[in-house]
Amino acid sequence: MESEKKVMLSGIQPSGALTLGSYLGAIRNWAGRAEKFDCYYFMADMHAITSRQVPADLRRNTLEQLAQYIACGLDPEKNVLFVQSHVPHHAQLGWVLNCYTMFGELSRMTQYKDKSAKNAENINGGLFTYPALMAADILLYQPDYVPVGEDQKQHVELTRNVAQRFNGIYGDVFKIPEPYIPEVGARIMSLADPLDKMSKSDKDQNGSIHLMDAPEEIMRKFKRAVTDSDTEHCVHYDRAEKPGVANLMQIYAACTGENYEAIERTFAGQGYGAFKAAVGEAVVALLDPIRTEAARLLADKAYLEEVYRKGAQRASYTAEKTLRKVYKKIGFLAT
Ligand code: TRP
């Protein structure tokens, strides 16, 4: 793909089913960008194995994620959609960049500290060096922007540092990318614990809405959503004092386009029960077409295979150019 357009790239780990949080905070904003940008989106399966995966689940989640990307509006003709492990350049450049990423830098990554604290029995080398692989994921495609959630910003900043360090030694090899953080829906919290991010790999799945959840399931989870002990049941936006209600309001606003004042007016005096049901209905209305379309696509494996094979080919074309340049610069003998 060679054009004047700016380039965007992002990935999500297929370590569980995609959530409402990933949709509102990320994928929803990706669709429609293809007119203005050359876009690459991938399933980060190589990142997913930094924590132990059940092989059949990883395979299924990877394919489902692709079907869901398409169902969310990412047209495979206009976006390059691929599976990370299908493009070997990621592992190849990942190794090289490991040698240009400092132990101290990696030690400062908050995600590493969090994940190793949560997962004390499997603090493997991959978990530690993961940001070097992520830097490779990004730099291979010379993107201008990397749309990510707030929690990934630090990794994009590390990527910039590594790229600058490399360019400082060898000349202009990598474009220095900018992180691109969405304002709306950047941080959708768990329905079970509104102080914790909604996550696809959470143990308590009552807190997470998945794109493939049936409407009854979604309604059930919203009915159980944690609010607060305010006896007035006042639907009012206050992140610090009423994090549960604020999170529900954020979700409702993201689904309907209404602002917080309008929501407060609509639900004044109605209590939390009615509000939670209304949020559930708004989410069902948003997700149902996506679920139906993803299910239809998943029934057509041949089509999905064609999409990811073509995607890997297109991605490899760009990745190959960057990797060749890097190998040459660092002094690897040409094949
Ligand atoms: N680290 C990201 C996450 O956990 C996923 C990811 C891997 C990614 N490689 C990337 C995101 C490159 C953006 C660009 O969500």
Image: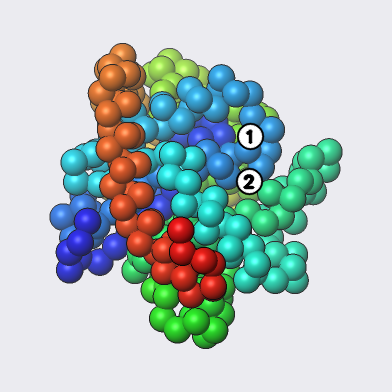
- Taking the spot 56% from the left edge, 80% from the top edge, the residue there is 165
Amino acid found under the numbered disc labelled 2: Asp
- Taking the spot 32% from the left edge, 26% from the top edge, the residue there is 305
On the question of residue 260 being in view, the answer is no
202 on left or right of 41: right
Image quarter hosting the N terminus: bottom left
Q: Position of residue 329 (x, y in %)?
A: 48, 75
Q: Whole-Å distance between the Cαs marked 2 and 1?
A: 10 Å
Q: Residues within 10 Å of mark 1 (few under 14, many from 20)?
A: some
Q: Which residue is mark 2?
A: 196
Check disc 2 and report its element: helix, strand or loop: loop
Amino acid found under the numbered disc labelled 1: Asp
Q: Which residue is mark 1?
A: 202
Q: Position of residue 91 (x, y in %)?
A: 54, 50
Q: Which mark is residue 96?
A: none
221 on left or right of 211: right
Q: Are marks 2 and 1 in contact (CB under 8 Å)?
A: yes
Q: Position of residue 177 (x, y in %)?
A: 41, 70
Q: Nearer the viewer, residue 157 or 101?
A: 101
Q: Is residue 79 above or below residue 70?
A: below
Query: Residue 298: which quarter of the image?
Result: top left
Is tag 2's residue or tag 1's residue first in the polypeptide sequence? 2
